[in-house]
């Protein structure tokens, strides 16, 4: 199969027929074999009924319905497991991403040799103050921390080799950092393409300020997990050893001072409490690293989401 098109959604019933017709047009013009995987993330409208109706008209359309809202990352993760196309395209369901970009994205993967190509919405139609400016700041920080030179990490329109999506796990709210997840998994050839951004036609935006707070917390988390998930002792053990050595050094100094001066009172010195605190913190960090090693080597890595219904899969 040439393409798997993955579309996570929540309450987008109005846009689905138009989006599907547009995708079908592009697929027919380019003679692609394809599947469209809609992931209904616990919609409260009739999105699932629309998906089932669309599947009756086109067997290439498939669907996954979550029993409740798990978030975009969960939807992408489940669809990635199910995708069978050589190239996997992700896009949003709100018609702000253009299916006309798909052929060029696929060409960059097949002919350009990229593991992943991320869209860059260079010209946007969002609110400048509440979305564009924070997005620029968010992307600048992510570029600096990850070392990946992309302008728009959170663009929903992306293309992947099938082995790339099978080699990563998207959890929590890590869909913002899929390029970082791919890099940590060893897929280092990551490209970028300027894509069209369209004004929202139906429904309302799911964007909120809370996403930026969560986003930066997730960035810290993914940076740590990417480096130390399989070797937590390298982090906790290092800092634990440093704290322990500082505490031990101060303790030795205090003991020598006491031996040389009988009137020297240990417990009246700030150094005594500093040494005690450093020794305790050092031992706690070292034990945290040891426990982390045991957990990382014995815990399953996959998240499990409760899927209520599927169609075509």
Image (spheres, rainbow, N blue to C red):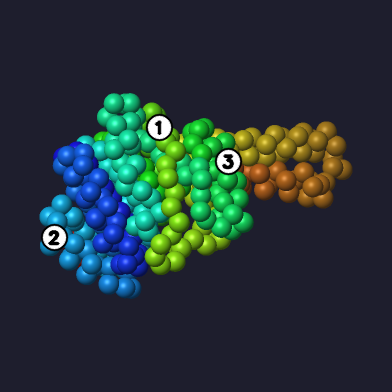
In what element is the residue under mark 2?
helix
Q: In front: 173, or 3?
A: 3
Point out the tag, 2 or 1, that comes first from the N-terminus. 2
Point out the tag, 2 or 3, that comes first from the N-terminus. 2
Instruction: Check whether the beta carbons of the residues at disc 2 and disc 1 lie within 8 A of each other.
Output: no
Q: How far apart are the alpha carbons under marks 2 and 3? A: 44 Å
Residue 155 placement (x, y as % from top left): 44, 47
Q: In front: 299, or 64?
A: 64
Q: Residue at x 40, y 32 (%)?
A: 190
Q: What residue does disc 2 label? A: 57
Residue 98 left/right relative to 215: left
- The quarter of the picture where residue 27 lies is top left
Residue 223 placement (x, y as % from top left): 49, 41
Residue 196 placement (x, y as % from top left): 42, 45
- Give the vertical position of 106 relative to 59 (above or below): above
Give the mark toward the camera: 2 or 3.
Answer: 2
Is residue 12 visible in this depiction of the protein?
yes
Residue 190, numbered label: 1
Q: Within 10 Å of the Cα at label 3, are there few (<14), some (14-19), or many (20+) other Cα atoms?
A: some
In what element is the residue under mark 3?
helix
- Give the vertical position of 288 relative to 20 (above or below): above
Point out the tag, 3 or 1, that comes first from the N-terminus. 3
Instruction: Check whether the beta carbons of the residues at disc 2 and disc 3 lie within 8 A of each other.
Output: no
Q: Residue at x 21, y 42 (%)?
A: 29
Q: Residue at x 50, y 33 (%)?
A: 149
Q: Quadrant of the C terminus?
A: bottom left
Q: How far apart are the alpha carbons under marks 2 and 1? A: 36 Å
Q: Quadrant of the N terminus?
A: top left
Residue 175 left/right relative to 160: right
Instruction: Check whether the beta carbons of the residues at disc 3 and disc 1 lie within 8 A of each other.
Output: no
Q: Within 10 Å of the Cα at label 2, are there few (<14), some (14-19), or many (20+) other Cα atoms?
A: few
Q: What residue does disc 3 label? A: 140
């Amino acid at each position: 199969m040439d393409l798997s098109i993955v579309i996570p959604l929540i309450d987008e019933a109005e846009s689905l027929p138009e989006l599907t017709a547009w995708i079908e047009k592009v697929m027919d013009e380019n003679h692609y074999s394809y599947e469209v995987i809609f992931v209904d993330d616990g919609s409260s409208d009739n999105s699932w009924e629309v998906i089932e109706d669309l599947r009756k008209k086109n067997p290439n359309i498939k669907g996954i319905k979550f029993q409740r809202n798990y978030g975009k990352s969960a939807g992408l993760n489940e669809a990635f497991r199910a995708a069978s196309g050589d190239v996997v395209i992700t896009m949003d369901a709100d018609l702000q991403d253009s299916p006309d970009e798909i052929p060029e994205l696929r060409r960059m993967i097949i002919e350009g040799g990229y593991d992943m190509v991320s869209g860059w919405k260079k010209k946007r139609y969002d609110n400048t103050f509440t979305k564009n400016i924070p997005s620029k700041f968010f992307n600048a920080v992510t570029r600096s921390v990850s070392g990946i030179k992309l302008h728009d990490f959170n663009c929903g329109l992306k293309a992947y080799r099938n082995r790339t999506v099978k080699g990563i796990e998207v959890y929590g709210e890590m869909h913002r950092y899929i390029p970082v997840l791919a890099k940590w998994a060893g897929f280092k050839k990551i490209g970028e393409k300027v894509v069209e951004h369209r004004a929202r036609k139906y429904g309302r935006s799911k964007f909120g300020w809370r996403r930026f707070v969560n986003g930066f917390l997730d960035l810290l988390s993914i940076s740590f997990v990417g480096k130390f998930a399989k070797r937590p002792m390298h982090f906790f053990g290092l800092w634990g050893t440093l704290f322990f050595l500082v505490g031990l050094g101060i303790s030795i100094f205090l003991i020598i001072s006491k031996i040389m001066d009988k009137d020297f009172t240990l417990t009246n010195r700030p150094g005594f409490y500093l040494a005690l605190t450093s020794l305790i913190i050092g031992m706690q960090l070292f034990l945290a690293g040891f426990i982390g090693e045991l957990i990382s080597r014995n815990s399953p890595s996959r998240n499990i989401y409760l899927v209520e219904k599927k169609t075509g899969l």
